[in-house]
């Protein structure tokens, strides 16, 4: 098995190196790609140094079985043909192809089989906030249909990339040192602040990030569920949190929901308010599962339930989800 990572120097690319090593992914050769900014840089994988190659329109992907791409939507669009033309399966972390009809959008806990039908050789990894939400929703959807979702997200700085994480560190330092604060990656200073805007605004007043949660949830879950989201950038470094209200076809009790979450694939129940036990991003960075807590009946809706989830968005929200897709293809002997 020959595997490629495109965007190896980035926040997600670096996580790919860790996840492939951590899970002992069955690969014989790993090749890394980047732009001229990182080409020539070396990263260690399984004790060996691998040099980043410049991503170009050539035959470098001949013999590659799986290409994990995380270099932005523009790069994915430009290089998809080059990457897939010799048969490599491209598992793409960008938003480039997610809503295309002939591209499966996959979260293995929810719709793994969709990955088997990929006419263009491309499988899209959903948006990070959507991935962690659908893992939790699936546990309830197995009990009764979810009709509506209201969600507020609390998204960490690293969701905007490695440089954004550095900017947050630097902003805190600048504030404490009484220096002018440099703002490049976000619309405003994020240190000591919250920013109720992620991605650009669309015509209906929602941001693109919020509309991704609406559209991608429906595609992954094969559902008519309606999702109304407010996405907020918060000064956490890593792991996104979400406050979720759902309306189901029949009422679901707290006990029933707890049982469903505790058995749900990819989920960990962390819900013991008496002992102050609930998921928090600071303590769950770097973990694989999505954590669920603060489960309550919605006071405003008989068929409503509300809960809080936290998941590492670079891991389950990006690299891990993509690697799990590849593991599924290997398991069902669909690749390699
Ligand atoms: N961060 C997250 O939590 C997260 C979660 C889910 C999905 N994603 C998606 O994953 C992708 C990468 O995000 P990130 O957070 O890892 O960003 P990042 O830290 O800014 O890294 C971007 C990566 O893309 C590479 N790149 C950019 N232009 C390129 C080109 N023309 N050719 C080859 N490589 C190029 C960069 O390489 P150089 O260093 O050589 O420029 C770098 O490795 C984005 O599409 C993002 O939306 C991110």
Image (cartoon, rainbow, N blue to C red):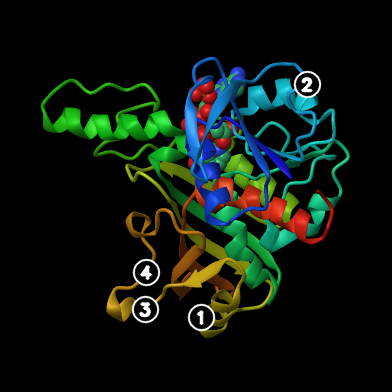
Against 133, is 144 above or below? Answer: below
Instruction: Find the distance from the CA under tag 4 to the CA under tag 1.
Output: 15 Å
Q: Which residue is mark 1?
A: 254
Q: Secondary structure at mark 2?
A: loop
Residue 22: give x, y in percent of width and height. 52, 55
Instruction: Tell which tag, 1 or 2, sits nearer the viewer.
Output: 2
**Mark earlier in primary sequence (2, 4):** 2
Q: Is mark 3 in CB contact (under 8 Å) with mark 1?
A: no
Give me the disc on residue 59: 2
According to the picture, the residue beneath numbered tag 3 turns out to be 272
Q: CA distance from mark 2 to mark 4?
A: 50 Å
Which residue occupies 57% across, 30% down?
7
Say whether residue 232 is visible: yes
Q: Nearer the viewer, residue 140 or 182?
A: 182
Q: Earlier in the sequence, mark 4 or mark 1?
A: 1
Q: Do residues under tags 4 and 1 come within 8 Å of each other at their CB atoms? A: no
Ligand 1 lies under 8 Å from the Cβ of mark 3: no
Local crowd size for mark 1, using a 10 Å CA cut-off: few (<14), some (14–19), many (≥20)? some
Quadrant containing ligand 1 reads: top right
Q: On the rendered structure, is 3 left or right of 183?
A: right
Q: Nearer the viewer, mark 3 or mark 1?
A: 3
Separation of disc 3 and disc 4 at Cα?
Answer: 7 Å
Mark sitting earlier along the chain (3/4)? 3
Residue at horizontal 77 percent and vertical 54 percent from the top? 329
Q: Which mark lies nearer to you, 4 or 1?
A: 4
- Residue position for label 4: 278
- At x 79%, y 36%, the residue is 88
Q: Is residue 312 left or right of residue 114?
A: left
**10 Å neighbourhood of mark 3: few (<14), some, or many (≥20)?**
few
């Amino acid at each position: 098995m020959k595997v490629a990572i495109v965007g190896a120097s980035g926040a997600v690319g670096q996580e790919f190196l860790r996840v492939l090593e951590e899970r002992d992914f069955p690969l014989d050769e790993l090749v890394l790609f980047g732009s001229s900014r990182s080409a020539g840089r070396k990263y260690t994988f399984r004790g060996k140094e691998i040099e980043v190659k410049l991503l170009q329109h050539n035959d470098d992907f001949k013999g590659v079985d799986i290409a994990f791409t995380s270099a932005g939507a523009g790069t994915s669009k430009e290089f998809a043909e080059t990457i897939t033309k010799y048969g490599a399966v491209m598992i793409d972390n960008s938003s480039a192809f997610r809503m295309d009809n002939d591209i499966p959008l996959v979260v293995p806990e929810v719709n793994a089989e969709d990955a088997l039908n990929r006419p263009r050789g491309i499988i899209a990894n959903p948006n990070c906030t959507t991935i962690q939400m659908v893992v939790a929703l699936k546990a309830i959807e197995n009990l009764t249909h979810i009709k509506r979702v209201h969600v507020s997200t609390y998204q960490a700085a690293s969701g905007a990339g490695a440089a954004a994480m550095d900017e947050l560190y630097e902003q805190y330092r600048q504030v404490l040192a009484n220096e002018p604060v440099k703002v490049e990656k976000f619309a405003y200073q994020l240190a000591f602040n919250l920013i109720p805007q992620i991605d650009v605004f669309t015509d209906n007043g929602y941001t693109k990030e919020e509309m991704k949660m609406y559209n991608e949830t429906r595609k992954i879950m094969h559902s008519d569920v309606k999702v109304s989201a407010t996405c907020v950038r918060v000064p956490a470094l890593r792991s996104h949190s979400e406050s979720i209200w759902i309306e189901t076809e029949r009422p679901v009790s707290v006990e029933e929901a707890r049982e469903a979450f505790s058995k749900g694939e990819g989920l960990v129940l962390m819900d013991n308010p008496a002992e102050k036990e609930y998921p928090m991003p600071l303590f769950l960075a770097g973990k694989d599962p999505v954590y669920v807590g603060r489960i309550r009946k919605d006071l405003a809706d008989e068929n409503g339930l509300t809960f809080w989830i936290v998941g590492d968005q670079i891991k389950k929200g990006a690299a891990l989800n993509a690697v799990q897709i590849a593991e599924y293809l290997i398991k069902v002997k669909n690749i390699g």
